[in-house]
Image: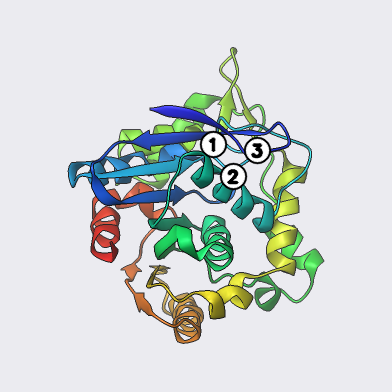
Amino acid sequence: MDLRVAVGEGVHLRVRRHDGAREPSFLLVHGLASNALLWDEVAAELAKAGHGSYAVDLRGHGESDLPDTGYDAATAAADLESVATALELRDLVVAGQSWGGNVVVRLAAEHPALVRALALVDGGWMDLSTQFATWDECAAALRPPDVDGLRVDQMRGYLRRAHPDWSAAAVEATVANLRVNPDGTMSRRLPIPRHMEIVRDMWEDPPQRFYPALAMPVLIVPAVPADPERAARSRARVEAAARALADAAIREYPGGDHDLHAQHPRELAADLLRLA
């Protein structure tokens, strides 16, 4: 079931609710330029185990509103707190993927009563200022490609070739990161200037400063690159994050895609259930 939840300033977010009678419920947060649909297969597995879940389209993403301001982790975390308050949610297992990991770290630090446990899915430990020498270098590397005008059949074909182990539902969920126009071409839901505002915020305000406030269990779920050199760098960052947290465990996905929730929904759901 899709809900529309007001988060202030005339902004409404789309929330995908999957019902379940068992506690705890789960709050599922997507990454940059993604959307809540990518959590659907994870949510279905959680529902089979009796747990409800709430997957949120952050502002400017998916079917949520696109206001002029608020493209930073602080506002995204405040929006999530507003969603939880409106829906009377507490004591949640909260999972954030990629930039969503950064957002949920801040949510848990600022609103610990909401969060029973935290899962950081290939995100939540990114510090771009240590990975790039300057902001200009970072911006050039992470500026997204201009895909407006690409045909939807081209996008589906690319995704199927790039991710042959993804389900049809995961492919369609990723297609939904863009808007399909009546003529079959696609356009960005999140405009590039807004996208880059988020990247700049990631550069200026990495999540590690919030780690001391996290007393709840934290599951760190990295997709470890197949290349040995890249894998070593990834493990070093993950292990540093684990050491800085009060109660952390690591569950690696060797050779996994960045979108682990699309590639391995059953396995990731099982990890979340064990965390619960």
Looking at marks 1 and 3 on the same chain, the residue that comes earlier in the sequence is marked by 3
The residue closer to the viewer here, 232 or 194, is: 194
How far from the left and from the top, in percent, is residue 54?
Answer: 41, 42
Alpha-carbon neighbours of circle 1 within 10 Å: few (<14), some, or many (≥20)? many
Looking at marks 2 and 3 on the same chain, the residue that comes earlier in the sequence is marked by 2
Between the residue at mark 2 and the residue at mark 1, the CA separation in whole angstroms equals 6 Å
Between the residue at mark 2 and the residue at mark 3, the CA separation in whole angstroms equals 8 Å
Viewer-side label of 1, 3:
3
Q: Is residue 250 left or right of residue 238?
A: left
Q: Name the kind of residue labelled 1 in the image.
A: Asn
- Dot 1: element: loop
Asked where in the image residue 270 lies, by quadrant, the reply is bottom left
How far from the left and from the top, in percent, is residue 202?
Answer: 68, 63
Residue 276 shows in this picture: yes
Residue 166 shows in this picture: no
Please report contact status of discs 2 and 3: CB closer than 8 Å, yes or no: no
- In the displayed structure, 174 sits above or below 200; it is above
Residue drawn at x 79%, y 38% is 68
The residue closer to the viewer here, 26 or 8, is: 8
Q: Which residue is the site of mark 1?
A: 177
